[in-house]
């Protein structure tokens, strides 16, 4: 393995962040006073001392080549004394200490169509997402591809048009939900719809007791097929969660015909106004339709339109829906309400309507 | 090095159209000179055609002495795309707040250009710098170059995962404690927990400077540390007038009527806040930021247990400590003593009582918050709950025996 | 008949003090001439002294041909209090709305004076007239005298329990359907289900004329039928002015700000209601009853499944039919056809699928509302839920097979 | 059994209610227009026709002797043409069709201290309750006795003083909750605190499998003691629910030292303003202290006082608490908050506080 075990350095942690703070930040650390968003992608912060820091935010596909990062570094060297940061939604932020360099930076960015300025304030920022077919064994759909398609369709809300409030979109390519889509205004979630298949060689790869006990619904039973120890799945009791596949590679759920997308709405994480909320099911299943997933982008645009037409200023998606009521949401979007929308998991009972507070 | 192979990618090419920057462009850029990136492109095109991923379950790969930081990945179509037969990712611990200078960033690029696909995620969902795709034999060299350059790996497996935080005091006027410093402190204090799996399952920290929670900590951190304040909102009456009232902001409908506790009154001139009933939601401050600011008695609320749904259903973090001071330690002081003590107690108890692959939040759901509090020696208070129990199923722990008057356990 | 025994009751005597009418006075009044009541007094005094009840589990007692209506009860201290060795209660089905005339009420008193302790509950929690305390051998004579007098027994055991209702059209301006008539209809249509246990467990109906729910139906009925309306609230502007505005009622704070959907506006003169967003909570009508009234398109909302906590936790009824017309049937018409069809379907399915001692609400919790709806052939609609599911655990019932394009179940 | 089986009449149901409706009600059935509450116990309803019906409501201890019912009948004959009704909270209502008889009725009622006029409008009406030591084998406390004590202490709110809104009190003597206390402004609930004892003769009385399976927490195991088949209880896993006792008389929980009272608050059933709510635990345990249960009456009065001092007009207990917050409720009442208040049953997780919306 390593040639020089003697010199091995471990547990040093990341570099201390102070190394990466522009001088104006270092001087005013924790002493910011106010900010102003000038355009959907440009803002400045002003410190108690009066010092100002401008930020220019540009979109990123999150998958960045080292060459692109070097391009970005070139721009940061030219206009930002070499300082930049990334955001929690994976955008790039150029930190401009010298206000006179703001316009030149923007001009340079505008020269390269890769750089789209935006993502601030009440609009749609980048989509938090995951690996998909680019890297993960578990995915029911691709991640980066759908993100690209959706952002192409809604980019005006990234860089120009403002909305009543923020719409935070997230995508995860399987129920593990690495994108934490469970609390998003709009969540795009890859789902399997078909119970796992059992590979012939299961007994060689997987521990049968572990596999059986991995199933939250108890759908997996030990079985013997052709003299080999294996498992069998009670398909009626299987909800295609793929937890068995996580512990046992011989139970793949991936299936071109039956994998696809579900759409969830109305979650949020900020404490602003209302408490954080989970996303709720809007559309149980849309088949995968690469490369441009038109049904998914249409569904997202439809929901955004209903939001624009109905939300009050500052209201998030979930807040709007709670105000107008879920029946109205389904009515306005034209999304079909089905049995699948009715919870049947652990706390299902707490989601039944136990009052006569109804609109007619 | 072999020449990168050229693939026809009619489907992926469609994803270079449109206004938003394209990941396909990035892969192609590397594919032009890197065979691994080229085969990734080829395999991905195949996935797009067949509507299925072609990656196998990961195996156990890593760097010596570490139990995490690398996700093993192998192609299921290695015959067709031999250059991605190995396609492991490396998680590099990002700096607090994702701040960089170009020098250190170029260093990362150079290491990765030399030893991997040249493709990254800036950043992974947990917060790491993700190096996407390399071979097993490259792991040690990469690691060694990283550490020599001052970088280290992030977490994976049943470790503490890489802590992350919002920009906080680095650029935000609402940072109610120093998220950058706390994140760095936790990362450094728990290097061992990050690199050598000590827990029943993963443990994530996320630090947000205020209740806006720009790092989504309440939804995806085993411990969510969210800045808040205890005293009155600071109101600059002059700014309120000049910046909002005079400019025609509809304070009544945009602010007062959206306050969750409706604890504000506005008569057209003064904004009267009943601070005892303010639940620190940030909304009024967000909207009227030129005039309003959080109070001066600042600290954080500690919440525990959020996670994604697998397998008992998604959880949000819930309040364990309504308010704790997190002032920057002075020279010679122990940093954040209450926080550190809490972490130790929680980890000790979870370490002993958590089942395999059971997150701390799931354990709390299983044993009950009341019992958990007792074990970690935190007093139960009504701030921790939405409302007291509605069911009468109380496990009374003591009762009187017939023959004595003393309560027994 | 033996002379009633005299007991010293210093503890119970304390309960004759104070302003509120005393049950002890009632027991004593009967104890003066009835040995059974006297022994009840004696045993109760002992319970008060010892802080424990002295009743044994009931046995199977009843009247011939009926499987319910009597609760058997025996004293655990029969040696000490022989007159309450048997102390069964009889449930007599009350008239709809608990309306009486003195003639029929006196008849009940006479029967009970002759054959029992002379003590009653007016009424039991389910709604019955409860005759408290008699011996097994008195049951048939009592039953025979009751039926001859036009009375019958109520339900107990795994039967339909005695339906009950609010006063409704008998005296209330808000009765949005005829609770008295529906209650009578159900009681009569299902005499067999009331008297001979056909179900996995008890089944209760409670009928409330409007969302005020004066009979607490939503909390304690397997089927709760609650009156409501679909059109606009009727506003009598003149009365609003004369009775409220002119008299200084604070309509803004007492009404507008308490409306759950805030769908009203009041400018000091007109009350403007956005009826499309009114959720028919009754509050504005309750407060401004001289001026406001429910709309004219009236009917009921049907909810299912409430019960006390034993053993899976208390449930409130939940919406199955948001609105159904319950107009009084005209000559020759079948009464309430949608309601009756729903009841039959629910009972059929519960009868076959409910576990022993499983209420219908518990069964719905177990199998899921979606499956239940499918079985009783009611379409799922969003009015039935607070919000759609938050977890991704969907049981997809159909998927494509590899070799065909058709969906299979 | 019955001497005359031939004549047996069955399944006739109750008399038709129309027989019991005063003529003015019959004529105006379903045609009421409005009402007015004149005093806390006297109201009239007016029909579209202009006809009026006065109602005088009097308290009842619910346990009524036939002699008392006859007294009531005498009064109804004298002033109400023989018509009366009872309410869903067990009060007696005299239905006065002839307005001139109203005052004479009231005068007659006032002569007998048993008759307390009141219970209407925003006050405290009678307490819905259950059997207790008077009739039930299962009770952890008496019912009628506590009801009497509480009503004695709060009767001014029954017959005189008005409150911001209604306070509905209910009592049940065991967890079966025949009084449906689970949705009351104030609920008084008898609780056992000690796990069941096992009678020696259990094997003769009870079916062991049924008994074992009756336990919701799985605390009961089959066992053999002194050669006899019986069961044993894991006391740590027992929450004293008494479901085992319901199916097996040989497992009594009743215990003078450990039975007592718990107090619950904030439930409601009406849909007025807010949706129906369950009651929530306020005080886990107060020992039985007959005959006057002073600790219970004090606890109830304390809660009522906090309600009076803090509720807005029309606000129910639970609505007030939701507005001021549970921490404030515990603070104002001085009730100790304990581990027992934190739910640990099925949906416990949904009651944890998952936001930073806190008051300091
Ligand atoms: C840069 C970033 C923090 C970071 O460390 O990277 C950030 C920065 C700011 N956020 Fe944020 N937020 C950032 C992610 C978030 C997130 C997390 C997420 O989206 O996953 C949230 C929670 C979203 C949710 O609730 O689902 C978030 C909820 C807010 C809110 C509350 C909005 C609301 O009404 O619910 C505010 C207040 C506001 O916008 O007025 C806010 C306000 C701000 C301000 C104005 C704070 C300040 O004074 O500096 C910052 C810039 C404005 C802007 O509009 O972008 N930020 N903000 C993140 C930018 C992500 C991006 O590239 O778009
Ligand atoms: C790379 C990353 C997604 C990304 O594209 O950004 C990722 C990728 C994987 N996650 Fe994740 N998770 C990533 C952040 C998350 C997050 C978000 C977060 O940390 O804020 C979550 C939701 C929050 C949470 O922790 O609950 C998340 C919840 C999961 C889960 C579900 C865990 C649970 O307890 O519910 C699994 C399943 C498991 O651990 O077996 C999982 C498992 C996985 C595995 C290891 C697949 C597996 O079953 O073994 C994925 C490897 C993919 C690959 O081939 O690269 N990943 N995973 C993220 C880590 C990058 C980084 O270090 O920065
Ligand atoms: C008499 C009465 C209480 C009263 O004082 O008013 C009563 C008394 C009993 N109830 Fe009840 N229940 C009475 C109304 C209720 C109600 C209220 C209602 O019907 O509106 C409830 C709550 C609503 C509900 O149905 O859930 C109620 C929920 C129970 C339960 C719990 C059932 C459950 O599914 O949760 C039991 C236990 C059982 O059935 O085994 C029960 C069992 C009993 C038994 C039969 C005791 C037993 O374990 O066998 C009690 C007999 C007492 C006795 O010796 O007289 N009783 N019971 C009520 C019936 C009088 C009547 O017919 O009018
Ligand atoms: C007579 C009775 C119906 C019956 O068939 O017996 C009845 C009769 C009336 N109720 Fe009621 N309610 C009666 C039990 C209830 C119950 C059930 C209960 O208490 O168990 C409730 C639900 C309580 C709850 O939510 O927990 C109830 C919730 C209401 C409400 C809603 C109050 C609220 O704000 O939540 C109103 C409206 C109001 O008071 O303005 C109301 C209003 C009325 C009115 C004004 C309706 C009318 O116009 O006639 C009636 C007389 C006024 C009064 O204050 O008593 N009635 N009312 C019941 C009298 C019980 C008693 O003796 O005190
Ligand atoms: S969401 Fe699922 S498929 Fe996507 S990266 Fe995470 S584990 Fe892999
Ligand atoms: S996919 Fe989930 S539910 Fe289906 S068998 Fe596997 S673990 Fe069980
Ligand atoms: S969480 Fe608060 S402190 Fe942190 S960046 Fe967002 S608004 Fe600023
Ligand atoms: S911070 Fe939120 S709760 Fe506090 S006053 Fe402002 S809007 Fe109201
Ligand atoms: S429920 Fe409605 S209709 Fe029935 S008595 Fe109460 S207020 Fe009148
Ligand atoms: S009935 Fe209720 S919801 Fe409708 S307008 Fe009146 S107060 Fe509002
Ligand atoms: S509540 Fe319990 S003790 Fe009281 S009557 Fe009902 S079953 Fe009996
Ligand atoms: S009282 Fe309840 S929990 Fe305890 S053993 Fe009996 S059934 Fe089980």
Image (spheres, coloured by chain):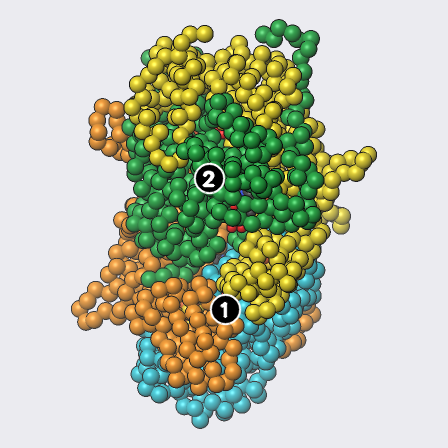
Chain colours: A cyan, B orange, C yellow, D green
Q: Nearer the viewer, residue B316 or B192?
A: B316
Chain name for mark 1: B
The quadrant where residue B146 appears: bottom left
**Residue C338 point in image, percent of width and height:** 73, 40
Disc 1 secondary structure class: helix
Q: Same chain for the residues at labels 2 and 1, yes or no? A: no
Q: Nearer the viewer, residue C94 or B87?
A: C94
Give the residue drawn at x 38%, y 67%: B274
Q: Nearer the viewer, residue B320 or D275?
A: D275
Up-down relation of residue D22 to residue A55 (above or below)? above
Marks 2,1: beta carbons within 8 A? no
Q: Residues within 10 Å of mark 2 (few under 14, many from 20)?
A: many
**Residue C54 point in image, percent of width and height:** 38, 19
Determine whether, in the image, residue C278 is placed left or right of residue B158: right
Up-down relation of residue C393 to residue B121 (above or below)? above
Q: Quadrant of the N terminus of chain A?
A: bottom left
Up-down relation of residue A250 to residue B9 (above or below)? above
**Residue D327 point in image, percent of width and height:** 35, 54
- In the orientation shown, which residue stands out farthest toward the top? D3
Is residue D201 at least partly visible in the picture?
no
Chain name for mark 2: D
The circle on residue B257 is: 1
Q: Residues within 10 Å of mark 1 (few under 14, many from 20)?
A: some
Give the residue drawn at x 41%, y 53%: D321
- CA gap, disc 2 and disc 1: 43 Å
Up-down relation of residue B398 to residue B354 (above or below)? above
Give the residue drawn at x 26%, y 59%: B338
Give the residue drawn at x 56%, y 69%: C268
Give the residue pinned by disc 2.
D117
């Amino acid at each position: 393995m390593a040639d020089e075990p003697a010199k091995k350095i471990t547990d040093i942690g990341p570099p201390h962040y102070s190394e990466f703070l522009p001088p104006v930040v270092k001087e005013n650390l924790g002493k910011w006073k106010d900010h102003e968003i000038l355009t959907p992608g440009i803002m400045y912060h002003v410190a108690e001392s009066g010092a100002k820091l401008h930020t220019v935010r540009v979109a990123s596909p999150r998958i960045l080549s080292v060459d692109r990062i070097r391009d970005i570094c070139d721009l940061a060297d030219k206009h930002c004394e070499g300082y930049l940061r990334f955001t929690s939604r994976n955008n790039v932020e150029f930190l401009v200490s010298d206000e006179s360099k703001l316009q030149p930076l923007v001009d340079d960015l505008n020269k390269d169509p890769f750089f789209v300025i935006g993502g601030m304030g009440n609009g749609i920022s980048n989509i938090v997402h995951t690996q998909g077919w680019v890297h993960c064994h578990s995915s029911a759909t691709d991640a980066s591809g759908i993100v690209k398609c959706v952002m192409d369709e809604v980019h005006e809300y990234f860089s120009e048009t403002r909305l009543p409030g923020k719409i935070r979109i997230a995508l995860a390519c399987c129920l593990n939900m690495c994108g934490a889509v469970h609390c998003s205004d709009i969540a795009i979630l890859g789902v399997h719809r078909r119970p796992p298949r059992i590979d012939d060689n299961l007994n060689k790869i997987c521990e049968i007791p572990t596999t059986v006990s991995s199933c939250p619904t108890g759908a997996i039973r030990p079985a013997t097929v052709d003299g080999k120890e294996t498992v069998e799945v009670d398909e009626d009791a299987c909800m295609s969660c793929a937890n068995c596949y996580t512990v046992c590679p011989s139970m793949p759920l991936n299936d071109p015909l039956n994998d696809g997308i579900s759409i969830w709405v109305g979650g949020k994480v900020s404490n602003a106004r209302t408490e954080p909320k989970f996303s709720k099911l809007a559309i149980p299943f849309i088949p995968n339709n690469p490369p441009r997933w038109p049904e998914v982008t249409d569904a997202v645009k439809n929901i955004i339109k209903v939001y624009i037409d109905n939300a009050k200023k500052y209201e998030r998606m979930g807040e709007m829906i709670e105000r107008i009521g879920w029946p109205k949401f389904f009515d306005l979007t034209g999304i079909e309400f089905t049995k699948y929308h009715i919870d049947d998991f652990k706390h299902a009972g707490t989601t039944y309507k136990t009052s006569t507070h109804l609109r007619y | 090095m072999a020449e990168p192979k050229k693939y026809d990618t009619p489907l992926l090419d469609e994803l270079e159209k449109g206004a938003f920057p394209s990941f396909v462009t990035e892969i192609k850029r590397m594919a032009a000179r890197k065979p691994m990136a080229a085969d990734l492109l080829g395999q991905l095109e195949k996935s797009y055609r067949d509507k299925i991923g072609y990656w196998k379950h990961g195996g156990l790969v890593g760097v010596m002495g570490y139990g995490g930081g690398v996700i093993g990945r192998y192609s299921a179509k290695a015959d067709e795309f031999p250059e991605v037969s190995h396609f492991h990712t490396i998680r590099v611990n990002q700096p607090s707040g994702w701040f960089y200078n170009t020098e250190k960033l170029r260093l990362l690029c150079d290491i990765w250009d030399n030893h991997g696909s040249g493709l990254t995620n800036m950043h992974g969902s947990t917060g790491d710098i993700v190096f996407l795709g390399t071979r097993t034999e490259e792991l040690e060299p990469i690691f060694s170059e990283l550490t020599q350059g001052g970088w280290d790996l992030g977490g994976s497996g049943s470790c503490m995962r890489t802590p992350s935080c919002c920009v906080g005091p680095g650029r935000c006027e609402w940072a109610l404690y120093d998220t950058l410093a706390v994140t760095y402190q936790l990362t450094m204090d728990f290097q061992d927990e990050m690199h050598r799996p000590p827990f029943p399952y993963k443990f994530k920290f996320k630090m947000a400077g205020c209740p806006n929670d720009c790092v989504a900590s309440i939804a995806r951190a085993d411990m969510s540390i969210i800045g808040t304040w205890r005293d009155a909102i600071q109101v600059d009456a002059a700014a309120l007038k000049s910046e909002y009232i005079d400019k025609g902001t509809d304070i009544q409908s945009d602010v007062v009527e959206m306050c969750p506790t409706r604890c504000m009154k506005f008569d057209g001139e003064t904004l009267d806040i009943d601070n005892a009933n303010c639940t620190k939601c940030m909304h009024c401050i967000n909207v009227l930021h030129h005039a309003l600011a959080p109070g001066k008695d600042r600290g954080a609320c500690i919440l525990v247990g959020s996670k994604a749904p697998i397998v008992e259903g998604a959880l949000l973090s819930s309040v364990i400590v309504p308010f704790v001071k997190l002032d920057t330690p002075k020279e010679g002081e122990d940093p954040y003593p209450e926080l550190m003590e809490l972490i130790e107690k929680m980890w000790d108890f979870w370490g002993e009582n958590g089942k395999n692959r059971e997150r701390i939040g799931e354990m709390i759901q299983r044993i009950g918050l009341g019992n958990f509090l007792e074990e970690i020696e935190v007093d139960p208070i009504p701030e921790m709950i939405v409302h007291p129990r509605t069911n009468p199923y109380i496990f009374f722990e003591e009762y009187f025996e017939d023959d004595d008057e003393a309560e027994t356990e």
